[in-house]
Amino acid sequence: MVGEFISRGFRGRGRDDPALAARTPPGQYLTKDFPVLSAGPTPHTPLSQWDFTIIGTVAPPLRWTWDEFRSLPSETFTVDIHCVTKWSKLDTVWEGVSVDTLLQGVETEGMFVTAFSDGGYTTNMPLADITGGKAWVAFSYDGEPLAPEHGGPARLLVPHLYFWKSAKWVRGLEIMTRDRAGFWEQLGYHDYGDPWREQRYQGD
Amino acid sequence: MAGTTVSGRLGWLLASVSARRVETSRSITLHLEADAWPGHLPGQHVDVRLTAPDGYRAQRSYSIASAPRPGHLELTVEDLDDGEVSPYLSEELQPGDQLELRGPIGGYFTWTEEDGGPLLLVAGGSGIVPLMSMLRYRHEIGSTVPTTLLYSSRAWDEIIYRDELEHFGDEDGLRVIHTLTRSQPDGWDGYTRRIDAAMLEAVAGNPPPNSLAYICGPTPLVESVANGLVLLNYAAGQIKTERFGPTGG
């Protein structure tokens, strides 16, 4: 029954260009806007008090002030982003520091990571998902400093996973030997969150 | 009632539309029945999936308007001009039709009596929907947790659930305060502007300890109210936000 169900009278609007449709994961729709979603107030940490740390099972722990962070080599990159609330946005342009750059020279036995943010937000993923050119700490969107409501001054960007993994207001990474569920992951959202496998919620 | 975490797979359910009620010129409420629906926590939402004859599918999320009840839920849908799913739900779907949904989803923007209070609920437009689930639940269980609803609408006729909110306004410990930002009926003596810092201070200043705030509406309203409440000394961790933008449909 369910699965072969047709919604009486529903045709949908015009189908997307096949090239765009091929870039749209199942259950997603394309938007040109940039919706804002967050669970609480937008933090406003002064840059003079901002730092970025890498802690956990790493030797030694690392810390950058804002100025130190911004003097690291950065990359401009264009990626598609997919929010679990169903919107996807193609060809978004960011500038940020590759997580590979941050982890250069770091020795760890940890296989998992928790990104942590101002305001207490956390999200978890395998370490392998933020290394190898797959993730950045982004400070610029569309040529402008990243706006606070979009996670500025800096957010994690892990575009191949649902966008809740791209922690806004990110302040660091905790590298762990065991996986530990983050904020939404404790509230029923999928532990991994691959949009192409439509891993929205636990059990998907 | 569902717990705050979801266990097992959230499967798709086929719900039947049992009633359709016009709320305002731009919004309707669908009453849905599904035996397998477990109930929800006030504030949660569902995913709705539509399938066209050629297999094309569209999914969106909608907040639940009703108080928790196994087997039954109500969704209030605003007809968005450029929407794809909302126009179908608000114009096409009729009693007797069926709809695929799964949920309940979201375990953070929720309130039950055990969470305590006092409660401050701030809504803009159809952002009232998940807050209405909290108010209906509060009413059903006879809670006396001190509660204030500050609700911004463009006009008197655009206030969703207006009559029901008026009745709620007589309840123990519940204040309902409207602001009408574009037009007001004759004799209106309430607020006539967008929610701002002065209004927040007058309505919700000096928060008692344990105050909880829930804000739902368009992003500019949510941003400014959340920032304003932080300045009024609400604890940041006790301000919960849910947003919708122009792309919600």
Image (cartoon, coloured by chain):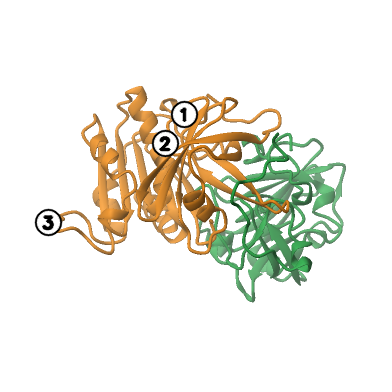
Chain colours: A green, B orange
Image position of B147 (left or right of B63): left
Whether tag 3 and tag 2 are in contact, CB under 8 A, the answer is no
Q: Quadrant of the C terminus of chain A?
A: top right
Q: CA distance from mark 3 to mark 2?
A: 30 Å
Whether tag 2 and tag 1 are in contact, CB under 8 A, the answer is yes
Q: CA distance from mark 3 to mark 1?
A: 37 Å
Q: Residue B68: which numbered mark, if any?
A: 1
Determine whether B147 is above or below A168 in the image.
above
Q: Nearer the viewer, residue B93 or B122?
A: B93
**Residue to which mark 2 is pinned:** B133
x, y percent for residue A72? 75, 69
Q: Amino acid at mark 1?
A: Pro
Q: CA distance from mark 2 to mark 1?
A: 8 Å
Image position of B118 (left or right of A129): left
Q: Amino acid at mark 2?
A: Ser
- Ranked by sequence position, the earlier of labels 3 and 1 is 1
- Ranked by sequence position, the earlier of labels 2 and 1 is 1
Q: Nearer the viewer, residue A23 or B51?
A: B51
Q: Residue B247: which numbered mark, if any?
A: none
- Ranked by sequence position, the earlier of labels 3 and 2 is 2
Q: Residues within 10 Å of mark 3 (few under 14, many from 20)?
A: few
Q: Secondary structure at mark 1?
A: loop
Q: Residues within 10 Å of mark 2 (few under 14, many from 20)?
A: many
Q: Are marks 3 and 2 on the same chain?
A: yes
Q: Secondary structure at mark 3?
A: loop
x, y percent for residue A91? 72, 70
**Residue to which mark 3 is pinned:** B187
Tell me which corner region of the image, top left, top right, bottom left or bottom right, holds residue A156. bottom right
Q: Residue at x 46, y 34 (%)?
A: B42
Q: Amino acid at mark 3?
A: Gly
